[in-house]
Amino acid sequence: GQNNVLFVCGYSSNAGLGKDDAMLWKLDYNNGTLLQALKCGGSENDYFYGITELNSNHILLYGQTQSFGNLKGDGYIVKARIQGDTISSRVIHETRAADFKTSCMLANGYILLGGSIDSLNNGLCDAWFVKLDTLSLTPFYKRSHGLKACNEKCTALMPHPTFYSEAYALFNTCENDVSTTDPKLIYLTWGGDFWGGYGTGTFGFDHADDALYAMAQTPSKALVFTGYTRGLNASDHDLLLIRKDSASCIAESIVSLPTIELQKKKLYYSFIYSKSKLNNTLPTLPFNQPPQALYDISGKLFYNEQSSVFSDEILAHAPNGFYILKLKNGQKLKFIICD
């Protein structure tokens, strides 16, 4: 958003010769005009899954590539330098048989990146984390199931590892408190059942086939997670919403959203409530008014009251209502602004 510019990362099959190429798009933040589209990765089937800003002139991009000769794909981190209309990039870190899908800022100039790794020789995909010094951009430690931290003093930062999982989202509840020695990291993993880490502890569900993909913090410091579960309905996946009190990390609320109905352009939806595992009470929901747009946790847009758009896919959105859509017709990207 600085200087009225928005950067979007991803990948495209239109920039090369039949291969997927990691891409960086530069957009006008006010009207969505595409200013630049740059191939900004390796040379062989590259994918960017995330982006984070270091300062006004540098951003980090991360994902997976086959550029290093491994057909399973290797996790890699790219640093891009922005000088006006000139953007240059270089690979600063590579991890074999892995990927990076999420990041969060820590105190004192560090950043933690997470994803999955498949090179621990246990035959499973495991949650994976790398901590970087944002000034030198050198790895401070690497951590995953079956590995010890390079610096043992950092082990307290790591959540509980899980087998056959991927770290989809990282969230630091104390990122603005530079004095804390416990960043209270939370990570979301997928692996048939959901398990997340809070500090050095864990929380999760005994239901089969659960996953969480995103989270946010409310003004009251409660944490809200979204994902899906089959624990409430054995025949299908249901939207899962969990609310946790970040102070006590006790309260849990589970909400399923299996059906949606449209009548006279008004949005109707029904919830199935599940009693909290710990306090046996029903959750309090923030849905007092029908939203103008409703989409599931994978980004699929069910209905947009403003444009009457159905079944398109929301890839990402910025705080000012800047949405990035992938249309069903031709699977092309579309950048729009809506209230």
Image (spheres, grey):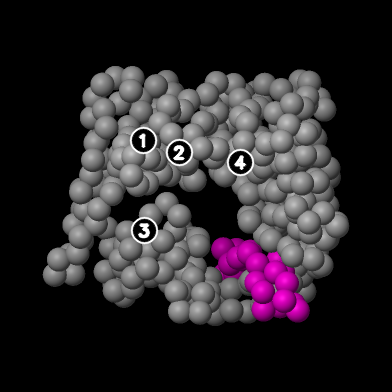
- Which of marks 1 and 4 precedes in the sequence? 4
On screen, residue 187 versus residue 328, left or right, reads: right
- Residue 31 lies, with reference to residue 144, above or below; the image says below
Where does label 1 land, which residue?
231
Q: Are marks 1 and 2 in contact (CB under 8 Å)?
A: yes
Q: Quadrant of residue 44?
A: bottom right
Disc 4 residue type (three-letter): Glu
Where does label 2 land, which residue?
209
Quadrant of the rendering where the N terminus is positioned: bottom right
| Residue 220 location (% of width, % of height) | 37, 34
- Span highlighted in magenta in the image: 1-22
- Residue 165 lies, with reference to residue 91, above or below; the image says above
For residue 246: magenta?
no
Residues packed near mark 2 inside 10 Å, few (<14), some (14 to 19) or many (20 plus): some
Q: Which mark is residue 295?
A: 3
Cα distance in 3D space between marks 4 and 2: 14 Å
For residue 15: magenta?
yes
Between marks 3 and 1 in the image, the one whose residue lies nearer the viewer:
1
Where does label 4 land, which residue?
166
Q: Are marks 4 and 2 in contact (CB under 8 Å)?
A: no
Cα distance in 3D space between marks 1 and 2: 7 Å
Disc 2 residue type (three-letter): Asp
Q: Are marks 4 and 1 in contact (CB under 8 Å)?
A: no
| Residue 271 location (% of width, % of height) | 23, 44
Between marks 4 and 1 in the image, the one whose residue lies nearer the viewer:
1
